[in-house]
Image (tube, grey):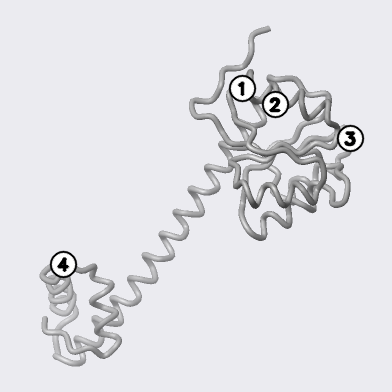
Amino acid sequence: MSAPEPLLSPLKIVLVEDDAAIRQHLRDIMESQLGHTVVGEAATGTDMLRKVLALEPDVVVFDIHLPHIDGLSALRQIYQERVVAAVAITADRDASLLQRALEEHVLAFLVKPIDSHQLGAAIRVAWARFSELRELKDENASLKQTLQNRKVIERAKGVLMKRHRWSEADAFRRLQRGATNRRVPMIDLAQEILNGKEVVL
């Protein structure tokens, strides 16, 4: 059976498993067969929390049943500070556990024993979903900013119309031209107007 093809760009992974032999086996698969880099290892939930926040990996592959804090609780605490692509591992075939994993934003889920193809696919899926979610979040933030900017520009336009008795089209055109002449974004000029600065347009 051939090894799965590595991803085009290797990912940085923190591996969390309390069984040292299984941890070594998974590390070998990730590095030798999948071409990723394991930047850190942990054997407890407390260590998982510390290592993921310190090392900032692309993906965390973790066993759910860990000493001190279980893996899902550790992940929830990590998510309060930074979001990471997460692959959960368990020996259970428990539907309620799977449900809890989904609620904690686990992006892929594996049941032991794990082979290289399963692990490779799970890491790919988790990273792809994570990248999509991050893109959507960025788009959403950008859209919110655009709407916010539009509101500021509309208000500045209203101020100019009132101050100079300009038409709406004229106020917008002068605002646009003023921003171009000053080589500043229109939103910055609009903000100056709203802040009461006298601007010659």
Whole-number angstrom distance, CA of label 2 to CA of label 4: 52 Å
Q: Which of marks 3 and 2 is nearer the N terminus?
A: 3
Q: Residue 170 carries which label?
A: none
Label 3 close to label 4 by CB (< 8 Å): no
Whole-number angstrom distance, CA of label 3 to CA of label 2: 17 Å
Quadrant assignment, res 142:
bottom left
**In the figure, 45 relative to 119: above or below?**
below
Q: Earlier in the sequence, mark 3 or mark 4?
A: 3
Q: Mark 4 points at which residue?
A: 183
In the image, taking residue 163 as reference, residue 104 lies left or right, namely right
At 68% from the left and 7% from the top, the residue drawn is 1
Which of discs 3 and 2 lies nearer the camera? The answer is 2
At 19% from the left and 79% from the top, the residue drawn is 168
Q: Earlier in the sequence, mark 4 or mark 1?
A: 1
Q: Mark 3 points at which residue?
A: 92
Q: Name the residue under label 1.
A: 34
Q: What element carries label 1?
A: loop
Whole-number angstrom distance, CA of label 2 to CA of label 1: 9 Å
Is 158 in front, or is 183? 183
Q: Position of residue 19 (x, y in %)?
A: 86, 32
Q: Name the residue under label 2.
A: 119
**Disc 4 crowd, CA 10 A, few/some/many (<14, 14-19, 20+):** few
Whole-number angstrom distance, CA of label 3 to CA of label 4: 61 Å
Q: Is mark 3 on a helix, strand or loop?
A: loop
Which of discs 3 and 4 lies nearer the camera? The answer is 4
Q: Position of residue 165 (x, y in %)?
A: 14, 90
Q: Position of residue 145 (x, y in %)?
A: 40, 66
Q: What element carries label 2?
A: helix
Is 110 in front, or is 157? 110
